[in-house]
Amino acid sequence: MKKIDIVVVNWNSGSQLKLCLDSLSSTVIEKKIVIDNFSSDDSAKLIADFHSVTLILSCTNLGFGKACNLGAEHAQGEFLLFLNPDAAVYPGTLEKSLAFMQDPRNADVGICGVRLKDETGHVARSCARFPSPWGFVAHALGLDRLFPRLGHSMAEWPHDSTRDVDQVIGAFFLVRRSVFDALGGFDERFFVYFEEVDFSRRARQAGWRSVYLADVQAFHAGGGTSNQVKARRLFYSLRSRLLYAHKHFGAAGFALTCTATLLLEPLSRTALALGRRSWTTCKETWFAYAMLWRWLPQWVFKGATR
């Protein structure tokens, strides 16, 4: 049986990182690589107890996609697992995933994900449809909350069966090394968010399938360290959305996405926050949009994606 190289990108993950590494005791693991994105919480020091881990310290926050690509450069196995530091595997998770990928019947599967559960045993909605301009409009207006099928998150599906999907989230992202190399890894223009969506779309265009395995489970806390900076998290998500739309949609689709993202969504988010009397959420929303509007001229006139 071939083995898996595991890449974990750490940014101020605290004790979550140790729990993640503690779970990685499977014999199918070839290398464990941690990229520390200039953490300030000393979480990287926890790795000192893990002699089998290759630690790479960055002098700046590279972003998720670029850090993953750096980790992949130090890997050598035929399979790569990109695992979030707020995730952990259970006994048998890696063995079953690898067996599925090595089954000759699944030779055209380039990417697979597993059933992710949180602390309460709740199954995370960890698969999604490829985004569309009208899907972003539905999200901007909050219509996907009322009619989930209008959105991208597949929230209407209980994630209770193995099936082909457009994409699985990056918290547990198992990919063939040959596919990763052929596609040039993650697009580093996406600092965080949408990098796995973009990769999955390019993989589909190249003829590879993505599969969600319902009978294989792993743990994922969700939110992770990005909960520490909610306004900035929203900004990164909105920025990556525009970058994705510009890359994959035509002019009309990109214009529609920009209209929904820049004009409709801040109003709907504000209305929802005020309706809930959540002044903090309202403040975070407008702080995120202030960052987005400051970035836009840099992108439009200078081509800056970060």
Image: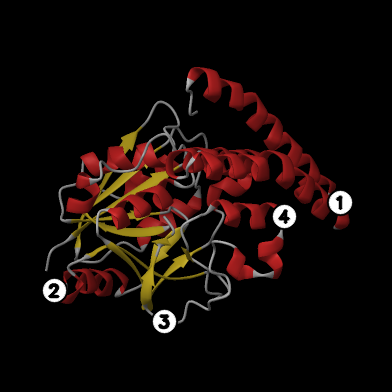
Amino acid type, label 2: Pro
Check the image and name the residue furthest to the front.
252
Residue occupied by mark 4? 141
**Separation of residues labelled 1 and 3 (CA atoms):** 38 Å
Image quadrant where residue 261 sits: top right
Residue occupied by mark 2? 104
- Answer whether labels 3 and 2 touch (C-beta < 8 Å): no
Q: Residue 33: where, in percent of width, then height?
A: 28, 46
Q: Earlier in the sequence, mark 4 or mark 3?
A: 4
Find numbered disc 4 in the image and state the secondary structure of the residue it sits on: loop
- Answer whether labels 2 and 4 touch (C-beta < 8 Å): no
Nearer the observer: mark 4 or 3; the answer is 4
Image quadrant where residue 290 sits: top right
Q: Is residue 242 left or right of residue 49?
A: right
Q: Is residue 219 left or right of residue 176?
A: right
Q: Residue 303: where, in percent of width, then height?
A: 47, 22
Q: Is residue 192 above or below residue 161?
A: above
Which numbered circle lies on residue 298?
Answer: none
| Colour scheme shown | secondary structure
Amino acid type, label 4: Leu
Q: Earlier in the sequence, mark 1 or mark 3?
A: 3
